[in-house]
């Protein structure tokens, strides 16, 4: 393991100036300020991933890069727009590739802190999407951070930028904090096995 915590960001859309991607970048910047090294797998990257097929072990270079980054990660930040009360297909497809980690010593997202961010035009879409993301993280054995961010922008202004910034800053810091605790426990456990 390197000296710095490694946090992987997954999310975004193919839309230029995507609010989801901006939110993810802000949370990753917070993780960097807390001392982490980060890597971003944004909407453009996710759009290039083929549909995940569990019956076909062939993987593109991009799919292998995503899986290897998560394998190495101490924490993740996942951001999705709220599409019809759920996560986007692109984000779900990227998370489906984590099935390739099932046989690892740390299977799926085991022992990793995961910050969840949902964006949308209103509270109903973001809250439902955030609940979906947290459920997926639990299913993958990850630890959702205590605060999940719901970033809303409505025609009348929605949430204040200050509230959105506070949430994204907190998510980034919590991923680093809990990732550091988890890494320390893992290193102690491995040292005890030697």
Image (cartoon, rainbow, N blue to C red):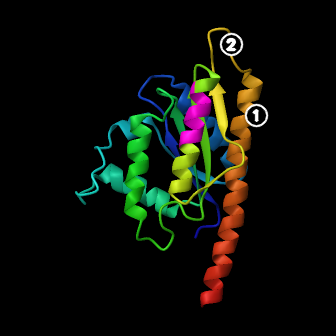
Q: Nearer the viewer, residue 155 or 180?
A: 155
Q: Nearer the viewer, residue 26 or 122?
A: 122
- Residue at 51 percent across and 35 percent down: it is 80
Tell me the element at label 2.
loop
Q: Position of residue 48 (x, y in %)?
A: 32, 39
Mark 1, residue position: 166
Relative to 1, is 92 above or below? above
Q: Nearer the viewer, residue 154 or 2?
A: 154
Q: Is residue 126 magenta?
A: yes
Span highlighted in magenta in the image: 125-132
Crowd rating for badge 2 (residues with CA inside 10 Å; few <14, some 14–19, many 20+): few
Q: Nearer the viewer, residue 139 or 188?
A: 139
Q: Position of residue 167 (x, y in %)?
A: 72, 36
Tell me the element at label 1.
helix
Mark 2, residue position: 157
> Which part of the image, by quadrant, shows the N terminus?
bottom right
- Residue at 51 percent across and 23 percent down: it is 17
């Amino acid at each position: 393991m390197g000296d710095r915590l490694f946090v992987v960001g997954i999310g975004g859309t193919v839309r230029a100036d995507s609010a989801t991607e901006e939110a993810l970048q802000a949370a990753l910047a917070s993780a960097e300020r807390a001392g982490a090294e980060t890597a971003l797998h944004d909407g453009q990257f996710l759009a290039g991933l083929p549909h995940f097929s569990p019956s076909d072990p062939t993987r593109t270079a991009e799919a292998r890069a995503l899986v290897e980054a998560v394998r190495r990660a101490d924490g993740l930040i996942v951001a999705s727009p709220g599409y019809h009360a759920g996560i986007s297909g692109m984000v779900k497809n990227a998370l489906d590739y984590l099935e390739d980690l099932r046989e690892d010593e740390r299977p799926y997202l085991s022992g990793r802190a995961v910050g969840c961010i949902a964006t949308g035009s209103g509270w109903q879409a973001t809250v439902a999407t955030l609940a979906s993301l947290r459920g997926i993280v639990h299913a993958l054995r990850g630890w959702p951070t205590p605060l999940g961010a719901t970033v809303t922008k409505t025609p009348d202004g929605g949430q204040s930028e200050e509230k959105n910034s506070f949430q994204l800053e907190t998510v980034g810091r919590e991923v680093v904090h809990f990732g550091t605790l988890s890494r320390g426990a893992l290193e102690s456990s491995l040292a005890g096995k030697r």
